[in-house]
Image (tube, rainbow, N blue to C red):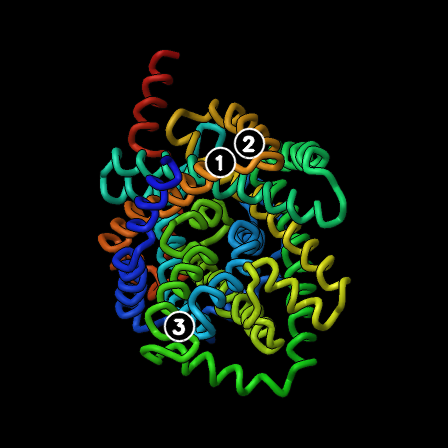
């Protein structure tokens, strides 16, 4: 009964109207910016990837992290099973045309993520320990003056971190390791210890791990996909034609067509890059940057790498192999594509990638949830949350809670409601920050604390 209730609620939250809201918000912000993600490609590429290797420091004296570390940490949270199994699931459920709609939603989502990051920087604060904190909670409270709505977002964020960001990822690692003959209880114990070590060091340690793991892991996975595509190069052009045809055909012979392709392509794209959920703004708010508009451009490259590039490469690698006609689930379809070229070693390689991507997602989401908990209950709740998070890792590795999966999916979707509401109201000032990104005097770093925290600080000083 619980599963049925979750399914009914989830179908509304992740149904066609909500997906239309995601697209509509992305289009609105894109139009306001003059489609900056397309026509300003030279500018945001130069600001992000070109400059990334000039400033590779992991943290600064004030506890912030580098912009490159913020990017890799945010990518760690969204890269993972969604880029591998999620893409395969979209192809199975929506047909080849789903890849087109996945990329289209990502192009619009690039501006959504950009504006989230801008607002995250503009309204960020310093807590009592001097660390930078930001994200939708802060720009909803300080930008809109809606403390209740900000608290609701923090509740959804904390809940989603324990479910979608934790237990589902831990379960993916356990299933992947079982392919190597490792028992789930062993995986649970080792994964819990590794997670405890990572989260105990805060964002600095999480970003340090992500900065080393994500570029190497992504490069290895993409290289393997390119080898698969090269081995089946004669199918590339027919594959692209099929993707475009299926994306616009009302009803194809295969039974897919426009409706299913759009539905599954857009939903899988949102699941993959998280644009509209506001989660990546939590990490980007801790970046050492001079300008809010500049940091927004790192959100553009984040969505581009995650979905436009990696999801497309994964999808094409699956389609050119000709394995889509079989009765397989998402994980099996990916494995079949890799094994068609690399043999059994391909399956082992894929399992390894899934495990490492899931682990990266797991530790990055711990920071999201901790920030949500600390917003709700104060800074001291962070240690309690970390203990609960590690316990959830162990539980998720050995037991599959179907009702928890459904509930966490709902919480993940609910994050978008207050966040998109704030983006629509604050979108104009976010876009204005992009226009002023090159002005050296235009520095909107919010190093002060929130109004409530200032009052508490003043009272403490008076008592002293």
Figure quadrant of residue 188 = top right
Pointers 1 and 3 in contact (CB under 8 A)?
no
Residue 450 is left or right of residue 362, and the answer is left
Tell me where residue 166 appears, x and y as whole percent. Answer: 53, 39
First of labels 1, 2 by sequence position: 1
Name the residue carrying label 2. Answer: 392
Horizontal and vertical percent position of residue 131? 49, 36
Q: How many C-alpha atoms fall within 10 Å of the one at disc 3: few (<14), some, or many (≥20)?
A: many
The N terminus lies in quadrant: top left
- Is the residue 35 above or below the residue 278 in the image? below
Q: Which residue is mark 1?
A: 162
- Residue at image position (66%, 74%) is 226
Give residue 421's position: percent from left, percent from top.
25, 50
Q: Earlier in the sequence, mark 1 or mark 3?
A: 1
Q: Which mark is residue 396?
A: none
Q: For the residues marked 3 and 2, what is the alpha-carbon distance in whole angstroms? A: 38 Å
Rendered image quadrant of residue 43: bottom left
For the C terminus, the image quarter is: top left
């Amino acid at each position: 009964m619980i599963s049925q209730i979750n399914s009914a609620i989830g179908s509304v939250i992740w149904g066609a109207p909500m997906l239309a809201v995601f697209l509509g918000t992305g289009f609105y912000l894109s139009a306001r910016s003059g489609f900056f993600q397309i026509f300003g490609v030279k500018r945001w590429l130069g600001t992000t990837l070109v400059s990334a290797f000039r400033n590779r420091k992991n943290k600064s004296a004030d506890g912030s992290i580098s912009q490159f570390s913020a990017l890799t940490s945010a990518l760690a949270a969204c890269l993972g099973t969604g880029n591998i199994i999620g893409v395969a699931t979209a192809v199975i459920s929506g047909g080849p045309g789903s890849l087109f709609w996945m990329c289209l939603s990502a192009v619009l989502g690039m501006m959504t993520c950009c504006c989230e990051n801008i607002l995250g920087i503009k309204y960020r604060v310093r807590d009592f320990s001097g660390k930078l904190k930001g994200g939708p909670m802060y720009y909803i409270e300080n930008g809109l003056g809606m403390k209740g709505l900000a608290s609701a977002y923090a509740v959804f964020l904390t809940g989603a971190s324990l479910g979608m960001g934790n237990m589902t990822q831990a379960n993916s690692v356990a299933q992947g390791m079982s392919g190597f003959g490792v028992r789930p209880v062993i995986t649970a114990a080792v994964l819990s210890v590794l997670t405890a070590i990572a989260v105990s060091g805060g964002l600095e340690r999480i970003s340090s791990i992500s900065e080393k793991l994500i570029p190497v892991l992504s490069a290895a996975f993409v290289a393997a996909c390119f080898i698969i595509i090269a081995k089946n190069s004669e199918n590339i052009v027919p594959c692209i034609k099929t993707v475009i045809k299926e994306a616009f055909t009302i009803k194809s012979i295969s039974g897919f067509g426009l409706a299913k392709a759009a539905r599954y392509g857009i939903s899988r794209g949102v699941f993959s890059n998280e644009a509209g959920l506001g989660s990546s703004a939590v990490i980007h708010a801790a970046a050492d940057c001079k300008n809010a508009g500049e940091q927004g451009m790192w959100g553009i490259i984040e969505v581009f790498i995650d979905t436009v590039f990696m999801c497309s490469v994964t999808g094409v690698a699956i389609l050119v192999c000709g394995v889509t006609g079989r009765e397989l689930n998402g994980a099996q379809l990916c494995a079949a594509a890799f094994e068609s070229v690399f043999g059994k070693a391909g399956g082992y390689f894929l399992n390894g990638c899934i495990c490492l991507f899931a682990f990266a997602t797991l530790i990055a989401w711990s920071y999201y949830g901790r920030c949500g908990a600390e917003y709700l209950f104060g800074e001291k709740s962070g240690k309690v949350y970390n203990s609960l998070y590690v316990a959830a890792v162990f539980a998720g590795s050995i037991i599959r809670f179907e009702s928890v999966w459904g509930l966490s999916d709902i919480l993940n979707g609910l994050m978008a409601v207050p966040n998109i509401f704030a983006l629509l109201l604050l979108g104009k000032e976010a876009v204005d920050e992009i226009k002023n990104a090159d002005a050296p005097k235009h520095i909107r770093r919010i190093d002060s604390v929130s109004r409530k925290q200032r009052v508490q600080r003043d009272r403490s000083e008076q008592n002293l």
